[in-house]
């Protein structure tokens, strides 16, 4: 039975989500503020978190950032904040999906299922290719510790979200090959990802800020106009 943590300061939304999630067979914990949510996330180690942004005590963005540093649990943001910048920030902090209120309960249930399936699929893919990928990959001042999920640039540890790590590892492992956004979504986010391909652009931009000397003129993480992205040794 999957464990899901629902975090929202609206009691009515919590009750609706809890009722429907339990009906689908999930074990559900709830929190109405960021501090309690962080405690439950650390104590119960849920398989997925449904997270509001506007929370008392600790807002959803900060909570997402903290959790992402500690675990790679899937996070679905559910919020009344509809501006594109909020969605971009949420995805850059490591959220796996983003829905706005008002929302369809049926669609949210479908996205929860898809996110859990995708998480399982990605883990199975990592296991399947683990023997093919070296323990450590070195390229142009970048060192990827595959098992430790760490990336160093010129000896300095970089702070990457789980998806940034997965995307960088995939492109470096297939350096020189061009992948369009659809292929990257399939290989990094999973075959049934419910979000948009713009997520790839967001993560590429964030990675360039961390691994390139001049993110505006990248020399490693390159755009191939009309096709997609690739990683090249320079």
Image (tube, rainbow, N blue to C red):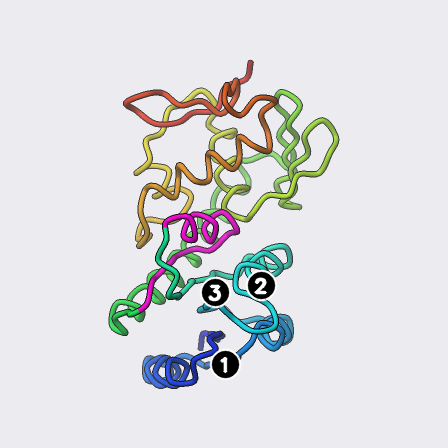
Q: Distance between the residues labelled 1 and 3?
A: 15 Å
Q: In this view, does 70 lie to the left or right of 219?
A: right
Looking at marks 2 and 1 on the same chain, the residue that comes earlier in the sequence is marked by 1
- Taking depth in this image into account, of 184 and 226 the one nearest to the observer is 226
Q: Which residue bears the numbered disc 1? A: 30
Q: How far apart are marks 2 and 1 (CA)?
A: 15 Å
Q: Which residue bears the numbered disc 3? A: 53
Question: Are the residues tagged 1 and 3 within 8 Å (C-beta)?
Answer: no
Q: Which residue bears the numbered disc 2? A: 63
**Position of residue 25 measured from the top left corner of the image (x, y, whole percent):** 37, 81
Residue 119 sits in quarter:
bottom left
Q: Indicate the secondary structure of the residue bearing disc 2.
A: helix
Looking at marks 2 and 3 on the same chain, the residue that comes earlier in the sequence is marked by 3
Image position of 159 with respect to 231: above or below: below
Q: Indicate the secondary structure of the residue bearing disc 1.
A: strand
Name the residue located 48 percent from the left edge and 65 percent from the top edge: 53
């Amino acid at each position: 039975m999957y464990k899901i943590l629902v975090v929202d300061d609206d009691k009515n939304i919590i009750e609706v989500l809890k009722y429907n999630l339990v009906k689908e067979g999930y074990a559900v914990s709830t929190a109405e503020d960021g501090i309690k949510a962080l405690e439950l996330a650390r104590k119960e180690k849920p398989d997925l978190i449904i997270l509001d942004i506007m929370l008392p005590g600790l807002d959803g963005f900060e909570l997402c950032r903290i959790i992402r540093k500690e675990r790679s649990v899937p996070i679905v943001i559910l919020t009344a904040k509809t501006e594109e910048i909020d969605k971009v920030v949420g995805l850059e902090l490591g959220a796996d999906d983003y829905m706005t209120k008002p929302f369809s309960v049926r669609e949210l249930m479908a996205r929860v299922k898809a996110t859990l399936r995708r998480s399982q699929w990605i883990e199975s893919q990592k296991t399947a290719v683990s023997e093919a990928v070296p323990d450590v990959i070195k390229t142009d001042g970048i060192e990827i510790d595959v098992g430790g999920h760490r990336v160093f640039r010129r000896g300095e540890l970089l702070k990457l979200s789980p998806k940034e790590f997965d995307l960088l590892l995939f492109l470096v492992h297939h350096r020189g090959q061009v992948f369009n956004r659809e292929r990257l979504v399939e290989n990094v986010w999973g075959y049934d990802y419910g979000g948009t391909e713009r997520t790839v652009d967001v993560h590429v931009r964030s990675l360039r800020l961390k691994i390139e000397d001049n993110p505006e003129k990248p020399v490693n993480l390159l755009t191939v106009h009309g096709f997609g992205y690739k990683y090249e040794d320079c």
